[in-house]
Image (cartoon, rainbow, N blue to C red):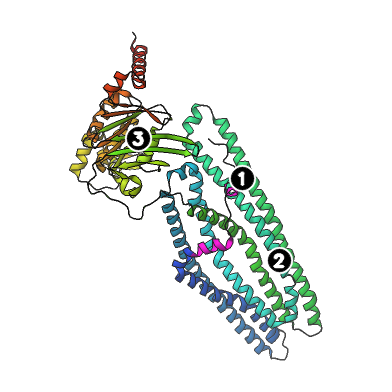
């Protein structure tokens, strides 16, 4: 496992501007415009309700409570009417707020559903080189934590900030209408608050970038450590893994504490500004009231409005954590959406009505890293219906040939052809429909054996039975209480390595491709299972062009053509008999395998 999980990946990428981020976010908001517009409209009702009650308090104080010129009965009736009106305003605000939450949650859920689906659809279309360069844990973080952060911003921040913004404008309008001198006194605090907010915004964005990067590093490490737990325990790596995780956890803790320190300064500063402003209003407004230049009701309403004025500021400070976290997540999500590591597509792809299955590598040069070629000027041809076996030591380039055949990658030089047509002229999905691939490590889909064979295809029971018989799975299926409907994989029974191989052959038969690729399909199985696999191989290879990669040379003797690759180059080529007569590398490998087999037999059964 790599020691660089803690590297801040975001520092290696350009940051997206807030303007661009909001522009991208609007793309997902537009389809939900009806619900968003409903929430925005209700915001004006909610804001209006919150702005009315200080005015009602002023009227109650000046017109009835302190107005000794009116009879007591009239004053009591007036206060009662204002109290009832106050209650009606509260109920109206509650109803509007209830429906706004409903509209907002619906819009937020739909937007996040669209964003999550779009992100996943984008990722599964990327080239394999992208997944080689990006850890699974980081990609999972994008689809889970980062999406959730943006959902929280949509549902609990955007409309809240809009509500508070409208309220802020409304309060300023009312305050200047009530007393412009007191309002100017309040406005003196604006530059200081703007400076505090801008400084805080810069520091908090940096803090959240660090937090999200370290969290992605933890997720990536956990994914690798847990998936490789058998290796960790076998090689006694528990202490090393604990220490590694401790370091990652400590870095995440430090980043979180830095963010807390930033907020521990910002939030009290807003409270200090609120208290200072309140003191200034009491000092100036109180003096005006004592000189009878202002009524007690107006001063009381002004203080109430002033406290309401700072409530949006407090909301901004509290929600700023969510906003900065969400904007950091949005930055990472949209950077992923802008990833363009695709296999190049042709505008007018070629489709062959009847594929014969002729394959050709023509002067192919390929490298995963610049300056380190894996294949060097590879050229060979496989006739339709023939079998070509490719052997070589680990790292010689065998798997790379498969990757090029499936068009997971394109060669830097030369071309790979199917029936005389360059693979780059085909649409990749259509091309892969005609290839069947059986690998050493078989991926099991959590579900029944039937589902794992068909993989969403529809076949008759008779056809499925024929496939099970040809792939040598019949005895296994008959032993199971639920037969083909037995659940395997996660949450079900486990299959042995050999049984998984047979299942993979059944998948190939269900797909019925024209070209078959076997990558170490007989590795790590016992002799009896190997015999079953050999029978399954004969069934799936019938009437198909086949490419076989195997360590066991006994499995490739029947091939029409055997290619030996060494350091990315073809060193020998021919049939089994031809290569044995040459007494070259293939002959040497055959003798070596026979010697090892004899030594193993002697060790097991004695001489």
Which residue matches tag 1? 252
Q: Which residues are magenta?
A: 1-26
Q: CA distance from mark 2 to mark 1?
A: 30 Å
Residue 82's spot in the image, x, y percent? Answer: 61, 83
Q: Are marks 3 and 1 in contact (CB under 8 Å)?
A: no
Res 218 seen here: yes
Q: Are marks 2 and 1 in contact (CB under 8 Å)?
A: no
Is residue 108 rendered magenta in the image? Answer: no
Q: Residues within 10 Å of mark 3 (few under 14, many from 20)?
A: some
Residue 42's spot in the image, x, y percent? Answer: 52, 74
Q: As drawn, is 51 to the left or to the right of 120?
A: right
- Where, by quadrant of the figure, is residue 572 drawn? top left
Q: Residues within 10 Å of mark 2 (few under 14, many from 20)?
A: some
Quadrant containing the C terminus in the rendered view: top left
Residue 525 drawn above or below residue 141: above
Whichever of callouts 3 and 1 sits on the residue coming sooner in the sequence is 1
Which residue matches tag 3? 379
- Where, by quadrant of the figure, is residue 322 drawn? bottom right
Q: As drawn, is 188 to the left or to the right of 566?
A: right
Q: Residue furthest top?
A: 607
Residue 174 drawn above or below residue 358: below
Residue 386's spot in the image, x, y percent? Answer: 24, 33
Q: As drawn, is 403 to the left or to the right of 98?
A: left
Whichever of callouts 2 and 1 sits on the residue coming sooner in the sequence is 2
Residue at figure coordinates x 46%, y 52% from the top left: 340
- Where, by quadrant of the figure, is residue 192 drawn? bottom right
Residue at figure coordinates x 51%, y 56% from the top left: 334
Q: CA distance from mark 3 to mark 1?
A: 51 Å
């Amino acid at each position: 496992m790599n020691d660089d999980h803690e590297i801040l990946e975001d520092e290696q990428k350009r940051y997206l501007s807030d303007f661009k981020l909001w522009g991208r976010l609007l793309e997902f908001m537009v389809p939900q415009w009806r619900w968003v517009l409903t929430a925005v409209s209700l915001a004006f009702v909610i804001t209006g309700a919150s702005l009315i009650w200080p005015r009602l308090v002023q009227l109650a104080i000046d017109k009835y409570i302190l107005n000794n010129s009116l009879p007591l009965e009239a004053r009591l009736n007036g206060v009662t009417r204002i109290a009832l009106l106050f209650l009606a305003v509260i109920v109206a605000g509650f109803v509007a707020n209830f429906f706004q939450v409903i509209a907002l949650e619906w819009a937020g859920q739909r937007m996040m559903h669209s964003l999550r689906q779009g992100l996943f659809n984008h990722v599964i279309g990327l080239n394999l080189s992208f997944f080689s360069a990006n850890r699974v844990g980081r990609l999972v973080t994008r689809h889970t934590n980062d999406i959730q952060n943006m959902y929280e911003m949509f549902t609990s921040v955007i409309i809240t900030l809009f509500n508070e913004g409208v309220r802020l404008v409304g309060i300023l309008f009312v305050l200047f209408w009530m007393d412009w001198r007191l309002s100017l006194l309040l406005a003196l605090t604006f530059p200081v608050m703007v400076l505090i907010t801008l400084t805080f915004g810069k520091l908090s964005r940096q803090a959240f970038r660090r937090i999200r990067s370290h969290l992605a590093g933890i997720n990536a490490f956990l994914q690798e450590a847990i998936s490789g737990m058998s290796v960790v325990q076998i090689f006694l790596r528990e202490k090393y893994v604990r220490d590694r995780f401790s370091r990652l956890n400590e870095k995440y803790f430090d980043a979180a504490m830095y963010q807390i320190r930033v907020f521990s300064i910002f939030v009290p500063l807003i409270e200090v500004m609120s208290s200072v402003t309140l003191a200034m209003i009491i000092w100036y407004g109180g003096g005006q009231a004592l000189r009878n230049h202002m009524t007690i009701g107006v001063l009381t309403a002004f203080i109430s409005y002033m406290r309401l004025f700072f409530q949006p500021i407090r909301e901004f400070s509290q929600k700023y954590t969510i906003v900065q976290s969400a904007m950091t997540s949005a930055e990472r999500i949209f950077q992923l959406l802008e990833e363009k590591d695709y296999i190049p597509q042709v505008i007018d792809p070629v489709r062959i009505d009847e594929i014969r299955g002729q394959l050709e590598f023509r002067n192919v040069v390929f490298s995963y890293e610049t300056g380190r070629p894996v294949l060097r000027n590879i050229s060979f041809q496989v006739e339709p219906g023939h079998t070509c076996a490719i052997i070589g030591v680990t790292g010689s380039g065998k798997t790379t040939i498969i990757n090029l055949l499936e068009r997971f990658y394109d060669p830097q030089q030369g071309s790979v052809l199917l029936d005389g047509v360059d693979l780059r002229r085909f649409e990749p999905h259509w091309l892969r429909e005609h290839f069947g691939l059986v690998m050493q490590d078989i991926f099991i889909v959590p579900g029944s054996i039937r589902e794992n064979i068909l993989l969403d295809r529809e076949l008759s029971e008779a056809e499925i039975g024929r496939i099970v018989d040809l792939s040598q799975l019949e005895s296994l299926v008959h032993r199971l209480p639920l037969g083909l409907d037995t659940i395997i994989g996660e949450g079900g029974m486990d299959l042995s390595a050999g049984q998984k191989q047979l299942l993979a052959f059944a998948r190939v038969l269900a797909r019925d491709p024209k070209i078959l690729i076997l990558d170490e399909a007989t590795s790590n199985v016992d002799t009896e299972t190997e015999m079953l696999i050999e029978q399954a191989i004969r069934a799936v290879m019938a009437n198909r062009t086949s490419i076989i990669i195997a360590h066991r040379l006994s499995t490739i003797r029947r091939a029409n053509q055997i290619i030996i690759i060494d350091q990315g180059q073809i060193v020998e080529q021919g049939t089994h008999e031809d290569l044995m007569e040459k007494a070259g590398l293939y002959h040497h490998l055959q003798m070596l395998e026979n010697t090892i087999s004899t030594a193993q037999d002697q060790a097991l059964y004695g001489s």
